[in-house]
Image (cartoon, helix red, strand yellow):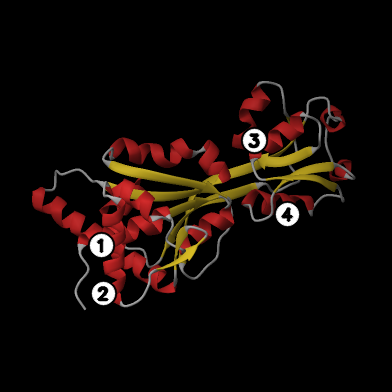
Amino acid sequence: MQSPSPRQLEVFVAVATTGSVRAASERLFLSQPAASMALAELERQIGFPLFARERGRLRLNDRGRDLLPLARELLERQAEFGRRARGTAAELSGEIGVGASNTIGNYLVGDLLGPFASAHPAVSLRLGVANTARIAQGVLDHDFDVGCVEGPVTHPSLEVRPWREDRLVVCARPGHPLTAKKRLRREDFAGQHWVLRERGSATRALSERALAALPEGRTVLELDQSEAIKQAVIAGLGIACVPEVAVGDAVQAGRIAVLPTPFLDLKRTLSVLLHRQRYRGPVLDAFLASV
């Protein structure tokens, strides 16, 4: 078999990342026919297709998922060869895809990406935001080079590194009956209406653990964003258990009140996820050193 060219590998990786030949050609500044030809020639040389066609998008098949980390490694090693050949002073360049769960992506993105972006302006950052389960799957599928999530993740193919501590708070609309109590007790939460995050999110999992330590209440609404939950609380639809960082502005503005609940364990550890098979070249190493 003839060895694939760097151009073929670039097209393969770009199509895997964007989901279409058109988007890949735009990213690589190629014509769409040229990108299609490079991918077709690569698949011809391998003797197998690398993608399944689903509703107009290209999804990696099992063979493609197996080869994608190797293709990325070859391209990164080639780039590193060029960088070293030009001298150690040459700045890092390339792209890194980061997946962040909702709280991190919406409220802590500056802490996550800021130091790296400032130190390595020639590296392009691609950020995807979803719940913890989807980000973990994205790292497993090589959609992201690295993930940063709110909840516990256990998978033999993933390395999990602690990043920082975080906590949730129970909050209500100012004027809610619970805000008038000088000292809240567990039994005060009996029959309360709760607004929760969707299942699959780390915030939902920790909220359910907290609710299990309280008298039975009623879930009146499930939403997939903390911002939507804040608005539901402000509107008086119920109380909620949300990340402290998500409600700081609303608390300062007097639109939300935090209920003191020292009897609940609402602390959690935010973590960085890495695929164990992912090649860790200079760009990824530099990113990991910055977080």
Q: Residue at x 38, y 72 (%)?
A: 49
Task: Tell me the amino acid under the disc marked 3.
Answer: Glu
Mark 1 vs 2: CB contact within 8 A = yes
Q: Mark 2 points at which residue?
A: 45
Q: CA gap, disc 1 to disc 4?
A: 49 Å
Q: Quadrant of residue 121?
A: top left
Residue farthest to the front, as pictured = 33
Q: Which of 56 and 11 is in front in this view?
A: 56
Mark 4 → mark 2, Cα distance in angstroms: 53 Å
For label 4, the crowd category at 10 Å Cα-Cα, with few meaning under 14, some 14 to 19 and many 20 or more, is some
Q: Earlier in the sequence, mark 1 or mark 2?
A: 1
What numbered label is drawn on residue 87? Answer: none
**Image position of 62 (left or right of 14):** right
Residue 209 image label? 4
Q: Where is residue 155 in the image (x, y as percent from the top left)?
A: 52, 68
In this view, the residue in front, 84 or 223, is 223
Give the mark toward the camera: 3 or 4. Answer: 3
Q: What residue type is labelled 4?
A: Arg
- Residues under numbered marks 1 and 4 in contact, where contact means CB atoms less than 8 Å apart: no
Observer-side mark, 1 or 4, equals 1
Residue drawn at the location 25% of the way across and 62% of the way down: 8
Report how far apart the C-alphas of labels 1 and 3 lie in the structure.
42 Å
- Label 1, label 2: how far apart the Cα atoms are: 11 Å
Q: Find numbered disc 2 in the image and state the secondary structure of the residue it sits on.
A: helix
Q: Residue 142: percent from the left, percent from the top?
A: 42, 61
